[in-house]
């Protein structure tokens, strides 16, 4: 089987940033978007340059580090990762096994996407990857590097809602609200692809999301409103 | 003194209108922070190790490998060696680590040994149950004689499987200690006040030192009233480590241990006289919701007959324990009763609508409500034109109609509210209730705004914290009556208190003042009306404060609703697939405060009903005792394409409004399954007696019926 070639953002092209070293700092960096100067490779190069006597010893390690920066060879320990989420740059040091969903929620404090089934069934974790809806629980964070990630937070804000979010409010397409971020993202993607969807299209495109409180009548009406149609049911 | 009543129909500013939930924007934009979303500095993640056995005794626990792992901070034994485990997935050890990934590694490294004991998980085979217990026996009149004399008789077996709550936000919480005696718990709970007391008691600190916070919660449906063992464990690990801890159940735990609705199996015989009056009822039921078995469903349901007998057997099983599931015991009772009565109507050669109307007096005090609702429902469904006798259809896909009645109490719970009026014109309600997504926050705001005669932008609701004035758990459709009663009384008292404060400053009497349409009016016309915000400046720097409680003076809420539902379904005779064409719900609930939220409750109930009618079931392997579908691939919820068209009609106006507020969370979720089963029976021509109505079961019924 061919090895996955992880898309990686060249570090030199990253905006200035620092890899977070603790959960606390990760959250801080996520909030502020603040970044520092280091990557692991740059650190090792710096060390090698600073201690000429040990340069020989370090060169082997450096080679290893270089090798690890080749596509497909990362981990198993934590590695630096860089993301572009909702138009902002983020960095984190994560194990390659961490899902995009856990990276967003646990490490970057972007908690709009929800963890419900954690295995690609319910759609509560839906985010956009380069504009296409994906289950964030079923994408590795390391594979999301180099892609534009859009979470529900990036679709709109309470003060400046996307028309689909306004429509969810208007038609009460939410109760407990735990499935809502996934539905909002999936609905936004639906409307991008089908500006005036018929009901079959709505059902098919939103069939990968599940609600427990039973808000489907409101969601149908919300999509119809945001699409510029009338109301359908509710 | 204030008169504690709701405003008359013509005087309502907000009540009864379609008002959007106030927290809609924060939810729709992903900003609402649920317990699962709380991330604290230095927080640990905890993962629980579960029993793979349905019945076993723990003989050894080895945590050394987990403890040696980098990043594992605490290994906490929840149930120690010697403990007898009564259901699979029961939690035994919790591992807390600096990341979720490491916590999972740690949990996987814990070694537990068991002495496996015999288990019993499939209660349908009641004869094989090791510990079945007679639970209820009740007889009125002489059912045997009445049955013998009946002109028409019918009998059948009806089955409702165990289902799960499957809340999308799993159970759990984040715990953080402020000092040795004070802890904050961000919990996914339906009962902030109750959880504070429970946790305080179990970890040995005053309940007042437990601060429970729940601003948003991702579904409970009756399963989230308790602090639960995992809540106590979370707080203990946080205390032991001095760090905040997040412990949320994984999906498999959520579906297998965090809530079940008991099964009901019943054998029913019924009899009617030549005019279609039901004269005899005889039912024997059994069921289980885990190790405690199950209480009897209320049989017969809604109706009471002169001659009736009912017996129930409780069957303990080694399955995750039952919790209250929306309208506990009613959906099961409704399926059994409405299917049995539909079968009797068929035997009597009657349209079930006529048959139910013929017997409607046997529903008691709600009879006239049911008649109005049945007529409205029949109109919305086109029942009179479209109903055909059972099995009239031909072809591969056949459609049919079914109906069912339900009832619920829904009286407001105990609740307290404090209202503050500030000189900038803001009016605030403080109330220790929680909003599960039913719209409680919005209801409180609109009652407050209504009472002050101001817009919703003038009011603020502070809720979701256990330190606020205590309010009951949100369950049993008791919240809306409780919080609206408490808020209305507090707000009326606050208006009086404002008048008392400002009347002297205006040189008039309290009794001369009234607030309406955002203005302060002088009843005697001695001064021109004054905008509320201008009047409020007279309050001064100390806000006016007043309290109110429910129950309290005046009739602001009531108990007891009817409600009817009708289903139009199609059944594919070759595949057994039941699909929903249309559902009609006609529901009363007294005075409706927010029509949009009320309708949402009913739409949601119809959808939840379609789901449990067609797909939801906890399936247990008799050999291993394990639940086979503790996930969301095979524990199936209906999707947006599965629920058909829905029509909701709320009964309002004279006869309804003056009853005051009555809860709505439970009633409409009771009847969908029964209405759908009756419709599937009408469509196929054979009794469809089992929920969920999976294709396999429907085909078996069709083939059995054809044999």
Image (cartoon, coloured by chain):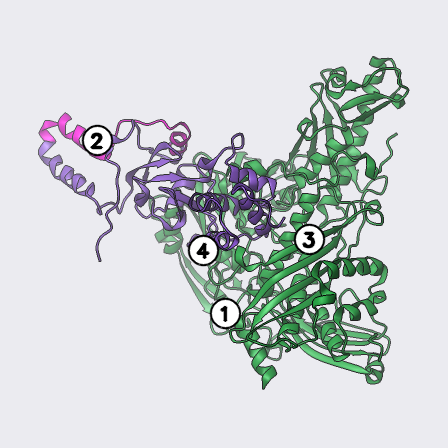
Region of the chain picked out in magenta, as a range: A26-54
Q: The residue marked by circle 2 belongs to what chain?
A: A
Q: What residue is pinned by disc 4?
A: A121
Q: Residue furthest right?
A: B524
Q: Which residue is drawn at 34% across and 33% down?
A: A20
List x then y, in percent, for residue B36. Answer: 50, 43
Is label 3 or label 1 in front?
Answer: 3
Q: What residue is pinned by disc 3?
A: B648
Q: What element carries label 2?
A: helix
Q: Which of marks 4 and 2 is nearer the N terminus?
A: 2
**What is the C-alpha distance between the residues marked 3 and 1?**
41 Å
Residue A234 visible to the viewer:
yes
Q: How crowded is mark 1: few (under 14 residues within 10 Å), some or many (20 or more)?
A: many
**What is the C-alpha distance between the residues marked 1 and 2?**
54 Å
Q: Residue B625 carries which label?
A: 1
Is label 4 or label 3 in front?
Answer: 3
The chain coloured purple is: A
How many numbered discs? 4
Quadrant position of the C terminus of chain B in the picture = bottom right
Q: What residue is pinned by disc 2?
A: A43
Q: Which of A36 and A164 is in front in this view?
A: A164
Do discs 4 and 2 belong to a common subunit? Answer: yes
């Amino acid at each position: 089987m061919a090895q996955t070639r992880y898309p990686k953002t060249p570090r030199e092209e990253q905006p200035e940033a620092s890899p977070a070293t603790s959960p606390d700092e990760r959250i801080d960096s996520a909030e502020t978007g603040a970044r520092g100067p280091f990557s692991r490779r740059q650190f090792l190069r710096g060390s090698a340059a600073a201690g000429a006597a040990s340069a020989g010893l370090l060169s082997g390690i450096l080679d290893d580090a270089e090798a690890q920066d080749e596509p497909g060879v990362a981990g198993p320990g934590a590695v630096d990762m860089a993301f572009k989420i909702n138009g902002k740059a983020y960095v984190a040091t994560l194990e390659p096994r961490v899902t995009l969903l856990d990276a967003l929620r646990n490490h970057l404090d972007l908690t709009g996407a929800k963890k419900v089934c954690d295995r690609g069934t319910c759609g509560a974790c839906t985010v956009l990857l380069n504009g296409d809806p994906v289950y964030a629980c079923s994408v590795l964070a390391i594979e999301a590097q180099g892609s534009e990630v859009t979470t529900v937070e990036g679709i709109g804000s309470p003060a400046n809602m996307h028309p689909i979010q306004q429509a969810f409010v208007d038609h009460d397409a939410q109760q407990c609200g735990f499935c809502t971020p996934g539905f909002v993202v999936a609905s936004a993607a639906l409307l991008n692809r089908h500006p005036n969807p018929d009901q079959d299209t709505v059902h098919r495109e939103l069939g990968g999301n599940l609600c427990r409180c039973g808000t489907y009548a409101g969601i149908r009406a919300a999509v119809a409103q945001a699409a510029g149609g009338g109301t359908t049911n509710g | 003194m204030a008169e504690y009543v709701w405003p008359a129909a013509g005087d309502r500013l907000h009540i009864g209108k379609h008002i959007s939930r106030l927290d809609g924007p924060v939810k729709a934009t992903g900003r609402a922070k649920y317990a699962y979303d709380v991330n604290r500095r230095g927080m640990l993640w905890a993962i629980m190790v579960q029993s793979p056995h349905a019945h076993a005794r723990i003989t050894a626990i080895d945590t050394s490998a987990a403890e040696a792992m980098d990043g594992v901070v605490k290994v906490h034994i929840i149930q120690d060696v010697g403990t007898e485990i009564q259901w699979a997935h029961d939690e035994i050890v919790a591992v807390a680590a600096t990341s979720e990934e490491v916590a999972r590694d740690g949990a996987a490294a814990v070694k537990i040994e068991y002495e496996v004991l015999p288990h019993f998980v499939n209660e349908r085979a009641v004869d094989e149950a090791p510990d079945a217990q007679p639970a209820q026996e009740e007889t009125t009149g002489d059912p045997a004689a009445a049955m013998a004399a009946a002109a028409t008789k019918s009998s059948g077996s009806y089955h409702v499987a165990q289902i799960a709550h499957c809340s999308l936000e799993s159970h759990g919480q984040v715990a953080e200690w402020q000092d040795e005696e004070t802890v904050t718990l961000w919990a996914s709970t339906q009962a902030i006040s109750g959880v504070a007391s429970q946790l305080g008691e179990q970890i040995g600190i005053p309940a007042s030192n437990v601060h429970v916070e729940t601003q948003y919660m991702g579904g409970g449906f009756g399963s989230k009233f308790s602090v639960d063992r995992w809540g106590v464990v979370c707080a203990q690990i946080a205390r032991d480590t001095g760090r905040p801890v997040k412990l949320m159940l994984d999906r498999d735990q959520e579906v297998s241990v965090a809530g079940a609705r008991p099964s009901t199996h019943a054998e029913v015989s019924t009899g009617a006289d030549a005019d279609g009056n039901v004269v005899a009822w005889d039912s024997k039921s059994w069921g289980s919701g885990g190790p405690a078995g199950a209480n009897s469903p209320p049989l017969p349901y809604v109706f009471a007959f002169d001659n009736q007998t009912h017996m129930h057997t409780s069957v303990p099983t080694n399955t995750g324990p039952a919790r209250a599931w929306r309208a506990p015991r009613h959906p099961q009772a409704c399926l059994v009763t409405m299917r049995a009565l539909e079968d009797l109507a068929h035997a009597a050669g009657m349209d079930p609508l006529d048959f139910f109307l013929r017997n409607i007096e046997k529903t008691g005090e709600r009879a006239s409500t049911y008649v109005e609702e049945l007529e409205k429902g029949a109109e919305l469904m086109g029942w009179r034109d479209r109903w055909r006798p059972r099995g009239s259809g031909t072809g591969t896909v056949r459609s049919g109609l079914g109906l069912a009645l339900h009832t619920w109490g829904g009286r407001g719970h105990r609740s307290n509210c404090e209202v503050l009026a500030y000189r900038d014109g803001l009016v605030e309600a403080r109330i220790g209730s929680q909003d599960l997504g039913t719209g409680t926050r919005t209801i409180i705001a609109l009652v407050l705004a209504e009472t002050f005669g101001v817009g919703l932008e003038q009011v603020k609701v502070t809720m979701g914290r256990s330190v606020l004035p205590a309010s009951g758990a949100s369950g049993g459709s008791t919240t809306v009556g409780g919080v609206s009663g408490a808020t209305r009384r507090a707000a009326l008292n606050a208006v009086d208190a404002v008048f008392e404060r400002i009347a002297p400053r205006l040189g008039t009497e309290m009794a001369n003042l009234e607030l309406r349409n955002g203005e302060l009016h002088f009843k005697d016309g001695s001064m021109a009306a004054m905008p509320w915000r201008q009047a409020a400046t007279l309050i001064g720097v100390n806000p006016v404060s007043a309290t109110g409680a429910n129950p309290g003076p005046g009739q602001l809420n009531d108990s007891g609703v009817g409600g009817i539902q009708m289903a139009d379904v199609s059944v594919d005779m070759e595949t057994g697939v039941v699909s929903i064409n249309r559902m009609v719900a006609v529901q009363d609930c007294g005075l409706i405060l927010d029509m949009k939220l009320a309708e949402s409750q009913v739409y949601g109930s119809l959808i939840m009903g379609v789901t449990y009618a067609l797909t939801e079931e906890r399936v247990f392997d008799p050999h291993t005792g394990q639940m086979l579908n503790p996930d969301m691939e095979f524990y199936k919820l209906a999707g947006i394409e599965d629920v058909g068209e829905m029509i909701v009609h709320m009964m309002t106006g004279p006869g309804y409004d003056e009853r005051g507020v009555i809860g709505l969370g439970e009633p409409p979720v009771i009847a969908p399954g029964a209405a759908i089963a009756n419709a599937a029976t009408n469509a196929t021509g054979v009794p469809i007696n089992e929920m969920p109505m999976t294709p396999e079961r429907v085909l078996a019924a069709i083939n059995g019926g054809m044999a």
